[in-house]
Image (tube, rainbow, N blue to C red):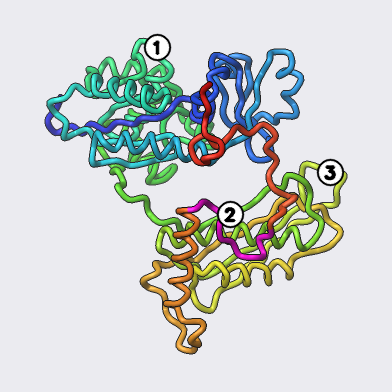
Amino acid sequence: MNTQQRSIALYDANNFYYSCESVFDPKLRNKPVVILSNNDGCAISRSNEAKALGIPMGAPWFKLKEVAEEHGIIARSSNYALYADMSNRFMSLLGEYSPDQEIYSIDECFLDLTTLRRVDHVTLSQNIRSRILQGIGLPICGGIGSTKTLAKLANHCAKKIPVYNGVCNFNIMASGELDSLLSNLDVKEVWGVGRRLVPKLQDLGVMTALDLKRADPERMRQLFSVVMEKTIRELNGNLCIELEDIVPPRKQILSSRSFGKNVIDMQGLSESISLCVSRAAEKLRKQRSNAGSITVFIRTSPFIEEYEQYSKAYTVSLPTQSDDTSELVGIALWALKKIFRPGFKYAKAGIMLGDLVPASGVQKDLFFSEEQSPDKKKRLMTALDTVNSKMGRNTLIVGSQGFTRPWQMKQDCKSKSFTTNWDELLVVD
């Protein structure tokens, strides 16, 4: 290995949502299974057997029911608490192998292995795969390259080409061997090349990953963007995108709910909006930010043509940036009253916190009363987050969230919370 060459690995779990489900229900293994989106709407994860039947990603479940009955396809509702917990365990184990870790998504993680020069990285990655499978039950693949873009492509090869046995290392390939491999990869497989860019690249004769690698980065920057230039340079082994040890704070926080059944009254919408604000405010405090504006939106379903359609949003600029749940809920409910119209069957509602600033840089209000003291609010929110973290989400809530929630998300095929609820732990007879 070149002493100057970086060695960046990308590990990700195969068919993550499905794999999480099959860990606790072995009967799902080697069966056609689809995991459904919110309200059991569309297929968002599929087992290999379901893929072999031609079930496309995003296919509406109601259109698959005849095929499901014919081929014995099993459906499961999304169990986000289970997936998040399994992801945390996965990332925690990976973090033991390198101090330089970037958690890219719920099932993907970059590790910088450059400093582990005396270790064979393929052997190490195979050991990681075995440990994750034995310790958590998740099947994973690994790709290694000198840049993040090459690591993503190597991971794709590890998944799709059986000869690599789940681990592909571009760094140990001769340049001719690597180019031959890239010539057989469609340009759409390159990280950073979205669907909209593919036809434009094809019009320029860029059909494969190798074509893109050989393109002039300066010209492609002029035709597309600096992102395209970085992608090309990364394909040529020039590191342009470093690992991020700390995920940058979000510039906006969105929280929304699609209803299990239509909501027609103000009460139901108020409960939903209050819940959305509470979730968003919790994330806001977690990243130590305050919001300077809040947008509230509601809409009917555009997919049911016989219903009269209505969609509206309203944005409020806050006089003082805030992370206080009760304060944000009050403003959101005021905005909701501005846009609510009776007589419609609402299918979705949500909020967006914008104009985020670091909590340490908030300009204090000179005219606050003792009851409005920022320190008192901060202690109250800290207590709220601490209790909910220790005792479980929704242990403490604002009253306007309600308790019955007849509009809550439809999850007819949801599995148990095997790892996050004492009452639903797996029992072995």
Separation (CA) of disc 2 from disc 3: 26 Å
Badge 2 amino acid: Ser
* Magenta extent: 391-402
Q: Report x, y in % for residue 301.
A: 76, 47
Q: Report x, y in % for residue 159.
A: 42, 20
Q: Residue at x 68, y 35 (%)?
A: 40
Query: Mark 2 or 1, which is nearer the eye?
Result: 2
Q: Residue furthest front?
A: 429
Give residue 80's quadrant in the image.
top right
Badge 3 amino acid: Glu
Residue 393 shown in magenta: yes
Query: Mark 3 or 1, which is nearer the eye?
Result: 1
Q: Residue at x 62, y 67 (%)?
A: 315
Q: Report x, y in % for residue 290.
A: 46, 67
Give residue 140's quadrant in the image.
top left
Q: Which residue is under mark 2?
A: 255
Secondary element at tag 2:
strand
Q: Which residue is under mark 3?
A: 305
In the displayed structure, would residue 160 be above or below residue 17? above
Separation (CA) of disc 2 from disc 1: 40 Å
Q: Identify the mark at residue 162; answer none if there is no mark.
A: 1
Badge 1 amino acid: Pro
Provide the major secondary structure of the magenta segment: loop
In the displayed structure, would residue 236 be above or below residue 274? above
Q: Considering only order in the chain, which callout, 3 or 2, is on the residue closer to the N terminus?
A: 2
Q: Considering only order in the chain, which callout, 1 or 3, is on the residue closer to the N terminus?
A: 1
Q: Report x, y in % for residue 298.
A: 71, 57
Secondary element at tag 1:
helix
The answer to whether the residue labelled 3 contacts the one labelled 1, judged by CB atoms less than 8 Å apart, is: no
